[in-house]
Image (cartoon, rainbow, N blue to C red):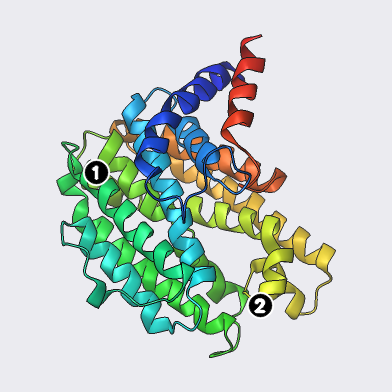
Amino acid sequence: MPEPDRGDVLNAALDAVPEVRRLLLPYTALFADGDSAASRLAFSCLSAAATFPHARREQIADLGALSTILFGVDDIADNVAGDWTDRDIVALFRRLSDVLTGAPIDDAGTPSVQGPAREAMREAMHAWQTWCARLRAYDGADAYLPDLARQLELTGEATARERVWATGGEPWPGYEEYLPNAAVTFLYHTWWLAALAICGQDTAGAWRSAAAVTDLGASCLRLANDVRTFQRERSEGKPNAVLIHERAGLSTEAAVERVSAHIRELNAEFAAEIGRLPAELAWVADGQYRCVAFSGGWYMARDTHAYTVRDLAADADAHRH
């Protein structure tokens, strides 16, 4: 993050933590306490504040809570689903889409899981319902709900496709097929649609004006994340940009460099596309630039785990002194 903003970002993230904790407190089966190394709460609040350092406390809290909940949903799709089919993944995201627009939670329409995973699923849906009610309270939210609902459905379809690849239902894709799909499952588009609704005063036209920027930002961060996680995903049998290059014959070192070089190219394209946004979307341009710079740098340096609220408080205190 820019050095002049570092103190403001750290303090804004820390100020948002109690509200996010309060929202997620009833759902401890899925969302670890912020002082646990398994929690993404501190990172989620910090990334929201790094993107919008001058937003109101409740806006940063709601975006931090969204990231934490989406991490939980992604964990369910990856790890809790067990014997789910790709159709079950699609059904899960369709239920999220329905709840977003005010539908009640309907167990009949949600894929079933057994054992401890059942409680995680229940908590994910109820946490999502609580967050969606907060989103709908924002003045500009109604203009974005249809696009956000559709984006959730697209994410479900893309996540289901990844599951088919990971479980051997279809051969792994080539790199050119993998990346557009993986950029969607990274949930950057979903997060930014919510950010426009929460932090903007514009109509939903802002989403279409920023589409190219958002696509590039999602690709930048997906690839940075792939470089961070390819060893874990190798053991899990999941497609990953680095692993796809390995399968095409590159060494691990060469595959990492190939992906890293593509990240640099995409970052340059991303910066150029940001420069083309109209003046009235300067706040979107600034936010997207900050978001990709912060999260991309973070993923290349460390994982989102093992950064606790205590770590965040220590960083804020160290900066003050």
The answer to whether residue 181 is seen in the rendering is no
Q: Residue at x 21, y 33 (%)?
A: 201
- In the image, taking residue 72 as reference, residue 198 lies left or right, namely left
Q: Quadrant of the N terminus?
A: top right
Q: Residue at x 61, y 73 (%)?
A: 175
Numbered circle sitting on residue 112: none
Q: Nearer the viewer, residue 315 or 240?
A: 315
Numbered circle sitting on residue 135: 1
Label 1 element class: helix
Spatial CA span between label 2 and label 1? 36 Å
Residue 102 on image: x %, y %:
15, 56
The part of the image, by quadrant, that contains residue 279 is: top left
Label 2 element class: loop
Circle 2 residues within 10 Å: few <14, some 14–19, many ≥20 = few
Q: Residue at x 51, y 76 (%)?
A: 162
Numbered circle sitting on residue 237: 2
Mark 2 and mark 1 residues within 8 Å of each other at the beta carbon:
no
Residue 204 on image: x %, y %:
21, 47
Above or below residue 248? Residue 304 is: above
In the image, farthest residue toward the top: 321
> What amino acid type should be assigned to the residue bearing mark 1?
Leu
> What amino acid type should be assigned to the residue bearing mark 2?
Gly
Residue 213 on image: x %, y %:
43, 49
The answer to whether residue 21 is seen in the rendering is yes
